[in-house]
Image (spheres, rainbow, N blue to C red):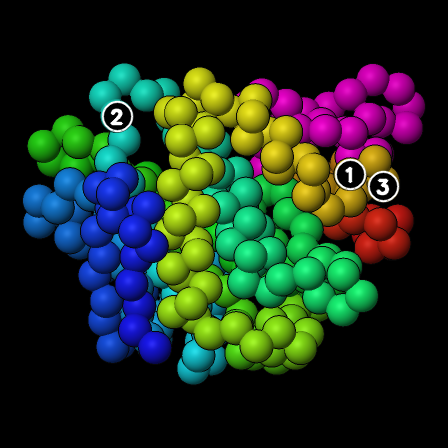
Amino acid sequence: MAFVLDPAATAAGYRLEVHDSLGSTSTQALARARAGETGPLWVVTREQTGGRGRRGKGWSWIPGNHAASLLWPVPAGLAPDRVATLGFVAGVAVERALRRACGPGMHGRGPDFRLKWPNDVLLDGAKLVGILLEMETLPDRRAVVTVGIGINVVGAPDGLPYPATSLAAAGYAVDAPGLFRLLSAAWVEAERLWDEGKGFSRIREAWLSAAAGLGGPVNIHAGGRSVAGIFETIDEGGRLVVRLAEGGHLAVSAGEVHFGTAATAA
């Protein structure tokens, strides 16, 4: 099956570049931007040999999985903290695309897709999707963002320090091209809802409706310290708000997060 954009994405001005093999879709998207590409442009590959995750970690490739990056032009004057909330737009879009691809499941119950702060998607508590945002200001002073989205469609890597799964392992017969087409449409919906950050409250509401660990214990490791409490919400800047055991609240902008029993053991 070929990779194609949904007609809604084409009508919204998105374009698509498909490769048989790339080191990284995000690296390719940034290279295209440096060469003058303005976007919005999706870069997709059938094989990715040098994918990367957050904090420079590698992203292992299994043939048949989904690797795509969106090159998105940052409007002039849009503040970096607003741009950063595109990660939540991506999470909402991916979660919607996955639900549409997988259907209602057995007994009419949908699969348990959850959005893990700040930018993962879980299935039955195990990592299914990684999302990576990278922003760059080009020599001509244009700013662009790449939104990299890796989805374990047919398999998950072994030997990870956290549980990981794939759609195939969970019994869902989905392929990467079909999922990408749904994602391209869901992104347009979510990005319009976001409205250059002016509609982040709507994205925040949609994200929280599928949030992992909301209302339960959370432990965050950041900057050489650990913070424990209850995951209460995310604020209007996308920060994770923790209700501390000793009273008061703390808003966290980055860190390694553990929920539930993993939080209490961390």
Q: Is residue 262 left or right of residue 20?
A: right
Range of residues picked out in magenta? 229-257
Sort mark 2 into few (<14), some (14-19) or many (20+) by Cα contacts within 10 Å.
Answer: few
On the image, the x and y values in percent for residue 240 come to: 67, 32
* Quadrant into which the N terminus falls: bottom left
On the image, the x and y values in percent for residue 182 come to: 44, 56
On the image, the x and y values in percent for residue 196 come to: 37, 25
Q: Secondary structure at mark 3?
A: strand
Q: Earlier in the sequence, mark 2 or mark 1?
A: 2
Q: Secondary structure at mark 1?
A: loop
Count of picture labels: 3
Q: Which residue is mark 2?
A: 75
Q: Is residue 218 left or right of residue 114?
A: right
Q: Which residue is mark 1?
A: 214
Residue at image position (43%, 38%) is 189
Query: Is any atom of residue 159 visible in this view?
Result: no
Q: Secondary structure at mark 2?
A: loop
What is the three-letter code of the residue carrying label 1? Leu
State the mark number for residue 217. 3
Q: Magenta segment: does it hold 253?
A: yes
Does the residue at mark 3 contact the one at mark 2 (Cβ under 8 Å)? no
Which of these two is toward me, 37 or 101? 101
Give the Cα distance between marks 2 and 1: 32 Å
Give the Cα distance between marks 3 and 2: 38 Å
Q: Nearer the viewer, mark 3 or mark 2?
A: 2
Residue at image position (46%, 74%) is 175
Q: Magenta segment: does it hold 265?
A: no
Q: Is residue 188 left or right of residue 130?
A: left
Residue at image position (65%, 71%) is 165
What is the three-letter code of the residue carrying label 3? Pro
137 above or below 155? above
180 above or below 50? above
